[in-house]
Every structure is written in structure tokens, then in C-alpha cells.
Amino acid sequence: MSVNTDRHGYYNGRVSLDRRIYHFQENDALKLRMFGATDKGLVRALNQDAYTCNASQGLVILSDGMGGHAAGEVASHMIVEGLSGALSAFEKYSVEEMPSRLDEAIQKVNTKVIMKSQEDPSCRGMGATVNVLCFSHGFVTIGHVGDSRTYLVRAFRTAENKPRFGIWSLTIDHNLGTFIDRGIMTPSEPIAEMPLTPRERSKLTRGMGVMTDPKPDIYSRRLEVGDVFLTCTDGLHGFVSDRDILKTIVTGSLTDAPQRLVDLAKAAGAPDNVTLVLTVISDESEPFRDFAGPTFQTRPYLLRLPNGEIQGLMTCQEIVDLWLQNSLPSNTEVAAGLGPWMLIRNKDQLFKTYPEFKIDKFHKHNHKDKNFSTLYKTLPETQSMPAKENDQPNHFKIQKHLKSVLIAAILSFFFVCLVWLIAAPEIAKILLPAY
């Protein structure tokens, strides 16, 4: 069967396609290799997913369509094609410009999808998710709308030199369940009293083509040799656990890992379309087989700053030191491999999930800083911004006053003793005649 693909390398949806893998050549400058796979799943008649990946350009775009018999397919392919054109020369932009340029491209394509939906009755109500990865200047910039995900997979060694692997979801699902769990949305009374069903939790809160401003999340991360990025639709992560995804990636050849992940999703009974792209930052054919990665006594962590920059891998002690010495901003998040993202200032919850963070100086410290801004600077270079006195909690102020009173009492005692030693002989002369 002949399969129609366009110059970007993605399936155009005009014929029935069960599976197909596209291999792309390496990008020598960034040591990029990309592998992709797509499948219509066990139930769906059409594959409404679309993707393109180009290692020579350093671009990955993935979209999961929704709505109607064919409208979802139209939306996803419009998004992939539109962003491919808008980002055809993104490498000319600096690292600092990329977030705004990527946001602008997503907004323009979103407007085109809305206009198509309004003009064509057969496309009424169509929408899609999107994940865009732009690799340039030693960074990856990720644009994200919906519930498709981008993961980071990394290998490291423990202090005993044992190999370990971690997987982190770099994106946050834009659905009802996630927004309620993170406190972004407050459920109404009926929802608050009754737990949501899995179908209700998966309802999208943001999407391309369904709102005038999809509010894309823009993340960035400095590339490191050994990074492996997995971008996938919910046809994979909705039916296969992160642990099983990680195990599948690191226990076989990366070349055929996309197809093995598709097979794993279908074995789990996934009814939805399954699409994924693996991006490998390494010139080794199998970087997980024999790697020279960093050593960690405990599992490493990532930090996500409020400006969307993702830092790591870091040890628990390194994160504590950075927070105390460099005044990490409010709303900084921390995540361990196979663990959830959590606000670093929510220490009680952090201690409960990650007990290794129970360090005395970290436990006692409480820093508030609402005015923090930085772009693409390593954290050790960040200027320290001490908290103002008015921003300190009440118990810190009480402790400060108690210390002042205690110091004053000690000084008064020593002063009285000194006066007594000097004046004692004169007092004795006056009192002696009385005896």
C-alpha cells in the first residue's frame, strides 16, 4: 500500500494506516536523533493524530485532534502544517526570543483553526492539543496546550555506582482533574462533594481551536548529552504508566522503542490513537547501555522556575543550598523521577513526598519573594535577594525579639557584676564601723 506523506514527513490521513515509523537523520551540531511512530489504535476508524519531526532542523510538532468524524483530523494537520511553516527558520532567534516567538506562532495557528471551524460546518467544534519542541543554541523550548505530554528520560548512577533511570513529565496536563488537584480551579459544590470519574477528569481546560487564547505553557531547558525526550499523545500515557514507559525505553534499542511503546499501549487495550516521538541528545547509538552519567546518593531532582525554565539534575542538598544562598523565587517547583511536580515552598507536603528533604536549615527557613525574574542563567549565578523584614513570618519576629531581650539581660548581669567588683571595697569601709 502506498502511504501519502508530505515533505514534513507526517501522515496526511488520506488512507487507512495501522502503523508506520519515520526515521530521520542526525543533527551533527546538536547530536540530535529522532524516531517517531503513530497508530490508529484498537477502536478508532481514523487516526486523528498528526506529527512531524525533523532532526536536521531540530523541530518536533505533535497534535491530537478531537471533534467530529473527520474534524479532529483536520485540526491536528492544520496545526502541524501551520506551525511547521511559522517555525521554519526558528533557529535564527536567540534563546531569549524563543518563548515569545513560539507563543506568537501558536496563537496565530490557533486563530486559523477557529476561522476554519466557523467557515466550514463540517469542522464545527473541532480542536486539538499541541506539543512543540524547538532545539537550538543548546536549549530546548517547549510549547504545550492540552493533555499531550513531553517527558525527559535520564540515566544516572548512585553512590554505589549502580545504574538508575528517571522519567519526568516536563508538561502539565490541561484537564479538569489536574487543574483541581493543583488548585488552579476550584470545583463547584456538586463536584466537590462527589469525586470525578476518569472521563470527567480528562476533560480539557485548554485546547487549540476551542478558545481565542489557549494560554500555551512555554518551558525551556538547557540540553545535556544523554537527554532523551519523549513527546506523546494521551493514547500512550493515558493507558501505560510512566514506570512502564521508562522500562520500555531503557531496556531495548532506541531505534525501535517507539513501535514497542505503541505495541505496549495496544496490549493495554488503548482504544485511542497512539502517537509519539523520541528525541535523543547523544551521538551514541544506545546511550543507556554504557553511559558516564553523574553520581547521586539519592534520586536526582528537577527545578522549574516561574519563568518556565527547567533546571537539573540536582541533588537534594544542592537544591537546599541554592534556595538558601540564591533566594529561589516563590512558586518554584521540584520533581523527582517518577514523582509529581510540587511547589518547593510547600515544605510540609514536600517532606511527606520526599523525606530526604528533611534538612534542619531547610526546615527552619521560610523565604518569600514575589518579585523575581531571570532568563536562562544558571542558578549559582543568580543574585541573592534577601527577604524584607516585613515579609518575615510572625514566629520569626517573635524569636528575634526574644533573642534581643535575652542578650540585654546577659549584658545587664555582667554590668552589675562589674560595678559590684569595683565598688565593693568602698562599701566595706562604710559598713565596717557599724559592726
Image (tube, rainbow, N blue to C red):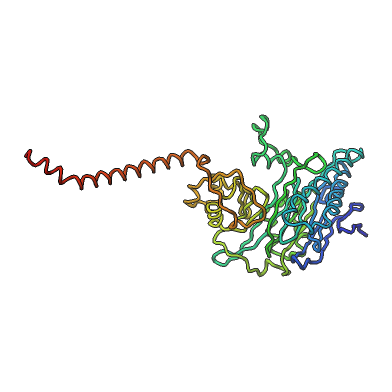
Q: In which quarter of the image is the C terminus?
A: top left
Residue at x-position 11% and y-position 43%: 429
Query: Which quadrant holds residue 70?
Result: top right
- Residue in view at x 68 percent, y 42 percent: 178
User: Is residue 373 among what the camera can see?
Assistant: yes
Q: Quadrant of the N terminus?
A: bottom right
Above or below for 201 versus 6: above
Residue drawn at x 77%, y 68% is 28
Q: Can residue 50 be seen in this view?
A: no
Residue 132 in percent (x, y) is at 77, 53
- For this rendering, which residue is in front, 88 or 251? 88
- Residue ranking furthest to the top: 189
Q: Is residue 188 above or below residue 296?
A: above
The x and y percentages for residue 300 are 59, 58
Residue at x 78%, y 66% (from the top left corner) = 27
Q: Where is residue 348 in the image (x, y as percent from the top left)?
A: 53, 44
Snapshot quadrant of residue 424: top left
Q: Toward the viewer: 244 or 182?
A: 182
- Residue 42 falls left or right of residue 162: right
| Residue 101 pos. (x, y %) | 78, 51
| Relative side of 79 to 335, left or right | right
